[in-house]
Every structure is written in C-alpha cells, then in structure tokens.
Amino acid sequence: MPTLLSDVFCQCRSAETHPGVDPGGGGGHAADTSSASPFNPSAHPCDICGGPEQEHRLKVLFQVLDVNGDGGICVNDLTIGLKKLGVHRTEHELMKIVKAGDKDLDGQLDFEEFVHYLRDHEKKLRLVFKSLDKKNDGRIDSQEIMQSLRDLGVNISEEQADKILKSMDKNGTMTIDWNEWRDYHLLHPADNIPEIILHWKHSTIFDVGESLMVPDEFTAEEKQTGMWWRHLVAGGGAGAVSRTCTAPLDRLKVLMQVHASKSNSMRISGGFTQMIREGGVRSLWRGNGINVIKIAPESAIKFMAYEQIKRLIGSNQEMLGIAERLVAGSLAGAIAQSSIYPMEVLKTRLALRKTGQYSGIVHCAKHIFQKEGVAAFYKGYVPNMLGIIPYAGIDLAVYETLKNSWLQRFATDSADPGVFVLLACGTTSSTCGQLSSYPLALVRTRMQGQATLEGGPQMSMSGLFRHIIRTEGVKGLYRGLAPNFMKVIPSVSISYVVYEHLKITLGVQSK
C-alpha cells in the first residue's frame, strides 16, 4: 500500500517507541519509527487483540475515511477516503468490506464495527502471513509465494511471483515483511483466505456409520496428478473396515427402529441376545455386505455430481463459499442417494431377515421384485430425500461455528488445528446433523421394512408419522438412537486410522 496509508499507521508506532509522546499531538511524527512496528517482535508488542496504541491507530484511520464526518463509513466514504490515501479498490470490493462489518445492517460502519472488522481481518492476515513464511524469518520471498500457490494447485512462473511481490514491496528489497503485507491487504475484502480454507476443508474422510464423508473439493494439482481417485479409494476402504467393525450396532439400530414399540421395549443387551439366539454370532453382520458394496458407487456418483453442480453454479473458485457448498453438497448427496437407493432398501431387508429367508443379496432382490414390484425398491425415498436438507444444513452450520470458535480462541501461530480438533469438529457436526434428521431416517427405515411385518399396514410417510406419535409419542421417533450414537466414535476412529494407512500405501501426498 502506498506510503500515505503507512503514515497513518506510523502514528501508533511512534507512540509505542516513545510512550511519553502523545500520538495525536504535533510530536507524533518526530519519533524514529524505522524499527518499531505493532507486529515487530523486536519492538514493543501490540497484539492483534488490541490495546490503547492500536485503538488510536484505528481511530486516526477511521477519521481519515469518514469523509463527511457523520460517524459512519459508507461505500462512498471508502471510495473517496482510500483514494486520498492512494489506495484504489473496486466498488464491489468496497461493498464487500461494508457488508462484512455492518452488524446492524444500516449500510455503513460505525467506529465499533470498523474496529471489529479490521481486528478480525488483521488476525486472519497474520495467520496467512505466518503460513506463507516457510523459512520463518519474518519475510516472504518469491520462492515462498510460488510454493504456497503450488500447494493450492496453482502453478506460476518466477516472473509472475516477482510481479506479485513487487505489488506489495514498498522498500525495494524484493521481500515482504509483516507491515508491508498488512498495509497492502488490510482494506482488501479477502473473505476467502486460502490457507485457512485448506486446513479446514469440510472434507476430512471419516465414516460416521450412517454416511461416509468423502472429499467434495480437490485442488487442480490433485485432479491433474490423479491423487483424487486415490483419496476416494482410501476413503472407501476406510469406510468398509469401519462399517464392518460396527455392523452389529448398525443392525441393532435397524431392528429397534422397525420392531421396538411401547409393548415391545427392545434394550441393547436384549437386542444382541435376541439376534445371537435367532441366528448365531454371524447374524450380527446381516446387511453389512450390501452396506459395504454401496460405498463405491455412492462416493463416485457424489464426487462427480458435486463437480458438475459446481460448474452449473458458475463458480470458478477452487473452493466454494458456505452457501454454495451447502447447495452443491445437498444436491450431490440427493443425486447419489437416488442412484443407489435400491441398495439402501436391500440393506434394510437383509438386516431384518430371519435365518434361511434369503440366500444372499441377489436372492433378496429377486424376491422383492417378484412379490412387490419395482416400486418396493423406492419405499421410504421421500423421507430419505427430505432428511438430506436438515442433515447437510445443520452439519455445515455446526462445523463452521466450531471452526470459527477455534480460530478466534486458539489460532495464534497457525490456522492448522491438528487432526484431533478436525475429527472432533467433524464428528460433533455430523452427529448434530444426524440428530436433526433422525425422525425422517426412522420413518424411512420403517417404510423400507414394512413388508417384513406380516399383516402390518403399509402406511405412507405422513400416516406413519401420525401413527408413531399417537401410539408411542415423540420418543417413538428416536428408537434406536442409542446404538446409532454408540457407533459414531469407533466408526470415526477406525475409518481415520485405516484411511491414513491406505493413503501411505496408495502414495497419497499429504499437504
């Protein structure tokens, strides 16, 4: 950023070096500021969280930008004020700044909103600067810029890197220090910080038992080098192992969803005893075969659908925004579920079967087709589709809330939260998503298994909801919830460990 804006910042730096000098007085610029900086470790520290010196610096900047002196900065004020400081931003960029900071939605930033926006923005910029500073020497050079962009899947030449560098380099050293980086980006609406997004991509592969989380966004480099399919294969293998390990709990959940009622209160221990008595220990894994087989087509279809939806949305960005991710993820999930839904019905029927009823998957499919017709393979389809929206929405909302909370409280030197924080956030958000859509999942399972109840009524979705509420109360919509949540932690743990090992075996490069 040009020197004029840096001069505004110097008023704070002068005060830090010479605390006896009033930053607002005439002697403010007389001090030597060559080595002092609010973010220079060798100078008096001024943390991002604020302090009287930084507050004064921001107040001076606010007064400069508040062109008409009405105590609020609108887009027009920003346009005129920044031009005075030698900074040029497009109207769209300035609108994004005002929109991001305008908490009371009055179309302008008062001083409190202005300070809150800049402090939050400076914190993110500090995290990105530290991640780009690969040598940890407090400066960024062209090689570090090239490496960081390469990690994002963007390859640029050294000449292009030098051009980026020169746009921020004020002192001609061909390196950027923190002050140059901050001064250049401070009033730029960088709402899509790549380094933070890469660490927090909501696509860590783990299996929560009910649905496998597969990557939805890959970098251009991962697509070109074929790493994407290795990620999918590793994730599929991890899901297969975790589902097999937790299959007894999954079958118990299905039995409780379909058969448990006020008159038939099925407990966890009693349910396991009943399954083993009826079909032996092997019966605990009924329905697991088809549950594992459907991982491959579901993951592949979801990934391909997500890529196509991204293009239809018209997004040229490597990473989608939150709203776009919700829409694309929900639609991709709906397409994938629609494609493999007959396999979901088969899984439920096989889990509910009695000893000797079906010889295998093919025999079960033939029996359903002959006795009930093609429509039987789509029983429970409507509640299944309706459940995708609350699941995806709450999952994403909780994840983003936990992510932002962690970044605000604990991100000091890096935006990388570590694997345990990522898994904890992902597991919590996914569990909340499951809880919100569980009544729809229960109704779906009951509709899929209605034909197995001899003499039982074949009810519609709304009829089944009314029947459950009338006969069992709201509690009836949550039958099987205990075994469902019991398998979450082992599923996530097993799938993550297996995924990491398969990644090594397949030669997947970790960033």
Image (cartoon, grey):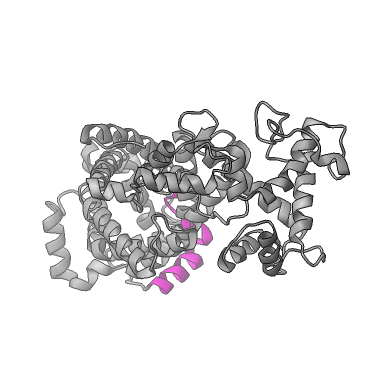
Can residue 423 be seen at all in this image of the molecule?
yes
Query: Looking at the picture, does residue 175 appear above or below residue 220?
Result: above
Q: Is residue 366 left or right of residue 87?
A: left
State the image quarter where residue 278 is shown. top left
Part of the protein shown in magenta: 461-482
Q: Position of residue 507 (x, y in %)?
A: 23, 35
Query: Looking at the picture, does residue 501 appear above or below residue 222?
Result: above
Q: Is residue 69 left or right of residue 331?
A: right
Q: Position of residue 8 (x, y in %)?
A: 73, 48
Asked whether 147 or 260 is in front, the reply is 147
Query: Looking at the picture, does residue 53 appear above or below residue 61?
Result: above
Asked whether 155 or 410 is in front, the reply is 155
The residue shown at (44%, 39%) is 423
Asked whether 509 or 362 is in front, the reply is 509
The image quadrant where one finds the C terminus is top left
Q: Is residue 82 left or right of residue 425?
A: right
Q: Position of residue 329 (x, y in %)?
A: 39, 60
| The stretch drawn in magenta includes residue 464 | yes
